[in-house]
Image (cartoon, rainbow, N blue to C red):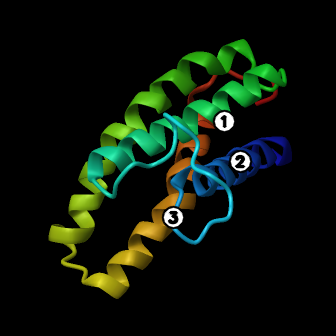
Amino acid sequence: MLRRVGRVAGFTLANMVVMVVLHGNSRQWWPKIPYLSLRDESVAEHCRLLFNTLAVVTLGQALLGRLPRERVAPRAALLVALPLALPALIALGRHGLRLRPPALERYYLSLVPLLPLLGGAWEEIVAPNAER
């Protein structure tokens, strides 16, 4: 149980760090990463950023040998599902909940850890695992 919680926490933390690095705002001191960093503030670009973040973390885990074979299919589904869900979550905040700028920014910021956390928890539930 503790190992599963650690995997989800590690996956969430890695996604948050990579997302901050790739997001690229004007106050950062590191350069934007070509093809991966955010180009503008559109919803489509944020979906691309989320996909790139998940892909970089997944690739890093695979290269480090921390992505077992039984997790490849759930992670592939996660790589597709989370970026596809992001426009609906953004619309929920803007139109469904009718949040205005200060609260809307907090809502968007809360999605940064929540999406990988939910994705990691979903992967733990779905992936066949010998240690259950």
Other-residue count near label 3 (Cα within 10 Å), few / some / many at <14 / 14–19 / ≥20: some
For label 1, the SS is helix
In the visual, does 36 lie left or right of 28? Answer: left
Q: What's the amino acid at mark 3? A: Asn
For the residues marked 2 and 1, what is the alpha-carbon distance in whole angstroms? 7 Å
Quarter holding residue 113: bottom right
Contact between marks 3 and 1 (CB within 8 A): the answer is: no
Lower position in the chain sequence, tag 2 or tag 1: 2
For the residues marked 2 and 3, what is the alpha-carbon distance in whole angstroms? 19 Å
Q: What's the amino acid at mark 1? A: Val
Q: Which residue is mark 2?
A: 14
Percent of width and height locating residue 77: 46, 25
Q: Which residue is mark 3?
A: 25
Q: Which mark is residue 57?
A: 1
Other-residue count near label 1 (Cα within 10 Å), few / some / many at <14 / 14–19 / ≥20: some
- Choose between 25 and 16: the one closer to the eye: 25
Q: Quadrant of the C terminus?
A: top right
Regarding residue 122, the answer to whether it shows in the image is no
Percent of width and height locating residue 41: 33, 58
Contact between marks 2 and 3 (CB within 8 A): the answer is: no
Residue at 51% x, 22% y is: 76
Q: What's the amino acid at mark 2? A: Ala
Q: Is residue 95 above or below residue 89?
A: below
Residue lying at the far left of the rendered structure? 95
Q: How many numbered callouts?
A: 3
For the residues marked 3 and 1, what is the alpha-carbon distance in whole angstroms? 20 Å
Mark 2 against mark 3, which lies toward the viewer?
3
Q: Is residue 3 above or below residue 56?
A: below
In the visual, does 50 lie left or right of 83? Answer: right
Quarter holding residue 73: top right
Contact between marks 2 and 1 (CB within 8 A): the answer is: yes
